[in-house]
Image (cartoon, rainbow, N blue to C red):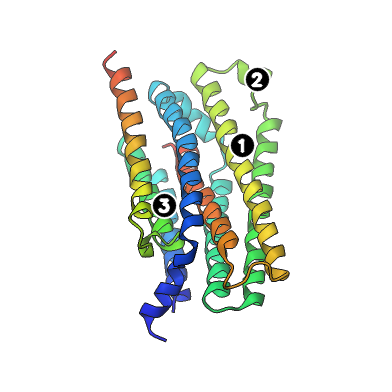
Amino acid sequence: MSSSHSQSVEVHEEGVKARVGLWLFLLSEILLFGGMFLLYSMYRYKNPGDFHAGSMELSRFDGTLNTLVLLTSSLTVVVALHSLHVKRNKRRAAIFLGATIALGLTFLVVKSFEWTAKFEHGLYPGAKFLESQPHGFILFFGLYFVMTGLHALHVIIGMAILSFVLNFVLRDKVTADRINIMENGALYWHLVDIIWIFLFPLFYLIS
Amino acid sequence: MTYPRYILVWVGLVLLTAITVTSASLNFGRVGILIVLAIAAIKSTLVLLYFMNLLFEKRLLLKILVPIAVCVLTIFIGLTYTDVLFR
């Protein structure tokens, strides 16, 4: 099979209408998070010292681990899509979809440990200890909880969507010839990954 | 033969992550934020082009959607900064 043929299969021309619809939704997501990044950059510009102090409270190890988990989950979901769509291998697609959902769960578990540690140190919105800190420090943790919280919500939604897709694949509702839902679910999952690619350096790596 | 390509992109993403984390601990001062943002931009471009398949999309609409979003965000952020800096 020539490579040009496999590429034309890969692009999936029939699904283009469904994809345009999903991409428009992804644009609205980019602007939603874009507004928050704008807010973040203004407050960081005004309170560089406090943002650095806030960042020092975060676990760089946990952040890096979660970055690797999400990057790997992006790989597994694209392999699942390719397995079903091009190779027509249902079993492999199901395995890699399951792996993606498991990696999403891993991300949330690490995140919950992180948040628990912050709560124990009195670093949560409204905590007496946090309220006694400088203004920029409070802003940093406000943004941290809102932005990583909204992102975690997206991870949960993405896992729910991929679970439906996995169910459909197992029941042959999604097949190599009816792949739209899986393709769009994978696109959504990648966007969640991209948002984390920006969140990670902005919160965990302030030097 | 696309599995190897996907794995190669993943290796690139992991290497770039390693570079960001290292650069952050080296203390580049004010330039540090530019370095980590540039690497994040490269990483998301890799995901968009290879994992989200934008490199192989034939429709112009799909090709220009992300550049449009980037332009809109640049205008938002640029205008906000001119307001705050020159107030």
Classify residue A46 by image quadrant. Answer: top left
CA distance separating discs 1 and 2 = 21 Å
| Residue at image mark 3 | B44
Classify residue A174 by image quadrant. Answer: bottom right
CA distance separating discs 3 and 1 = 21 Å
- Tag on residue A149? 1
Position of A138 relative to B18 (above/below): above
Q: Is residue B83 left or right of residue A47?
A: left
Nearer to me, B7 or B29: B7
Amino acid residing under circle 1: Gly
**What kind of element bears circle 2?**
helix
**What kind of element bears circle 3?**
helix
Q: Can residue A60 be seen?
A: yes
- Quadrant where the N terminus of chain A sits is bottom left
Q: Chain of mark 2?
A: A
- Tag on residue A129? 2
Residues at discs 1 and 2 in contact (Cβ within 8 Å)? no
* Local crowd size for mark 2, using a 10 Å CA cut-off: few (<14), some (14–19), many (≥20): few
Residue at 57% from the left image edge and 66% from the top image edge: A179
Q: Is residue A190 left or right of residue A119?
A: left
Disc 1 or 2, which lies upstream in sequence?
2
Position of residue A157 measured from the top left corner of the image (x, y, whole percent): 65, 47
Position of residue B36 measured from the top left corner of the image (x, y, whole percent): 38, 44
Residue at 50% from the left image edge and 40% from the top image edge: A29
Position of residue A198 measured from the top left corner of the image (x, y, whole percent): 45, 43
**What kind of element bears circle 1?**
helix
Nearer to me, B36 or B41: B41
Amino acid residing under circle 3: Ser
Q: Chain of mark 3?
A: B
Amino acid residing under circle 2: Phe
Q: Chain of mark 1?
A: A
